[in-house]
Amino acid sequence: VLDFRAVAALSPTGRVILGFLGVAGPHSGYGIKRLVDGSARFFWAVSYGQIYPELRRLREAEFVTAKDKPTGGRARVEWSITPAGSRALREWLTSDDGGTFEMRDEGMLRLFFLGGAPEEDRPAVLGRIVARHRQIAQQLERIRPFAAEAPNKYPSDVLETGIAYHEWLAERFARIAAEEEPDG
Amino acid sequence: VLDFRAVAALSPTGRVILGFLGVAGPHSGYGIKRLVDGSARFFWAVSYGQIYPELRRLREAEFVTAKDKPTGGRARVEWSITPAGSRALREWLTSDDGGTFEMRDEGMLRLFFLGGAPEEDRPAVLGRIVARHRQIAQQLERIRPFAAEAPNKYPSDVLETGIAYHEWLAERFARIAAEEEPDG
DNA sequence: ATACTCATGTAAGCTGTTACATGATTCT
DNA sequence: AGAATCATGTAACAGCTTACATGAGTAT
């Protein structure tokens, strides 16, 4: 028998788009990009080059509908999730395969190969990684007000996890750096 | 004036390859792949489709040399890092730009959009994410002996960070799941 | 005036994965 | 004998980023 489960047609980018249209209501492509950049980019980034084509694919699958909503003479398309789209979103959310988990962390890579750097340079290398993670944590802290606006607590849960993660990593790298010079 | 700093020519994949040839000595392309899979894949994955072409690019840049070392009738090329390669590796390690930090975590994405799933399904969704992270942590624990073989402690530092991270995430998701049903 | 934000879109290019093809050696 | 591992490699594809082009509205 044919298997037409909607979830099969949902690409990773499609999930993000559908997810935002589902929790945040109708938005333009540009608006979706802003939403992602303002809350999800630290664990899932998207670019315009993905959003606009993917919106058209989602429309073909009838998971979203488009409506012209110009602002004066400025073109603007407002995208909305359909009942079929909500169903697909729900199916993905509750499906049992874990899905993508990917990481590319050059800081970790540097730590891994740190033995290849002269001993006297190592504290500085580690220090830069610490500073970086603290900076990311601070950037995330600044978007707390936005996350709090969501209709439920989950975006805040995610954001707090991200902040805690980067602070935790910063501390960990700081501790490793401290071990480098045991007697100052 | 022309800028011939070697680091400019080092692609992300090139760094991993050069790093392993630097800390683990000469290896075949296949061997490099095994090293990466056995220790770095959780924060930096590579595939054969990258390794073999990249090795030839690194040879062109004179960061590595190739030597035929067949095993009986089985072809085998052993790659070694050159002094110029070591220099490039050191320059990358101590360079001040933070470099790539990317993450694609479908578990986080699901948590973010969990409001789109029926309330009764949410604990199961969260439970699967918890199980996943525990499983990854266990897989990483199994490669502890390998990391301990390294000539310095850094690979173990990285591995322990990875294990702690996934356990920490599992606990965090478990706590969020527990909050779902406040009075059992 | 000028700069910034809102808004849509694409083309070129880079990176990376998957799947396949091939074949020798070693282990059970 | 058969399975697993060692070993090299590529072609097709998928996914994503960067840079560009275009232009209207809004704030300074």
Image: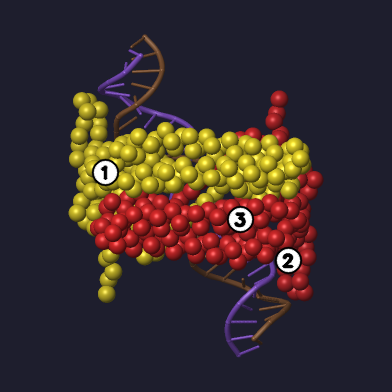
Chain colours: A red, B yellow, C purple, D brown
Give neighbour class at mark 2: few <14, some 14-19, many 20+ (Cα, 10 Å): some
* Residue type at tag 1: Pro
* Residue type at tag 2: Arg
Q: Nearer the viewer, residue A134 or A96?
A: A134
Position of A176 compared to A121: left or right?
right
Q: Is residue D20 above or below residue C25?
A: below
**Local SS, label 2:** loop
Q: Determine the chain carrying the residue at label 2.
A: A
Q: Are marks 1 and 2 in contact (CB under 8 Å)?
A: no
Q: Quadrant of residue C24?
A: top left
The quadrant the C terminus of chain B occupies is top right
Q: Is residue B150 above or below residue A125?
A: above
- Residue B121 in picture, x, y percent from top left: 73, 38
- Residue A5 in picture, x, y percent from top left: 71, 35
Between the residue at mark 1 and the residue at mark 2, the CA separation in whole angstroms equals 59 Å
Q: Are marks 1 and 3 in contact (CB under 8 Å)?
A: no
Q: Residue at coordinates 50% horizontally, 54% vertically from top-left?
A: A168
Q: Determine the chain carrying the residue at label 1.
A: B
Between the residue at mark 3 and the residue at mark 2, the CA separation in whole angstroms equals 33 Å
Q: Which residue is mark 1?
A: B151
- Residue B52 in picture, x, y percent from top left: 33, 42
Q: Which residue is mark 2?
A: A76
Q: Which residue is mark 3?
A: A160
* Residue type at tag 3: Glu
Q: In this view of the protein, can residue B20 be seen by the observer?
A: yes
Q: In this view of the protein, can residue A30 be seen by the observer?
A: no
Residue depth check, mark 1 versus mark 2: number of the one nearer the observer? 1
Q: Residue furthest front?
A: A183
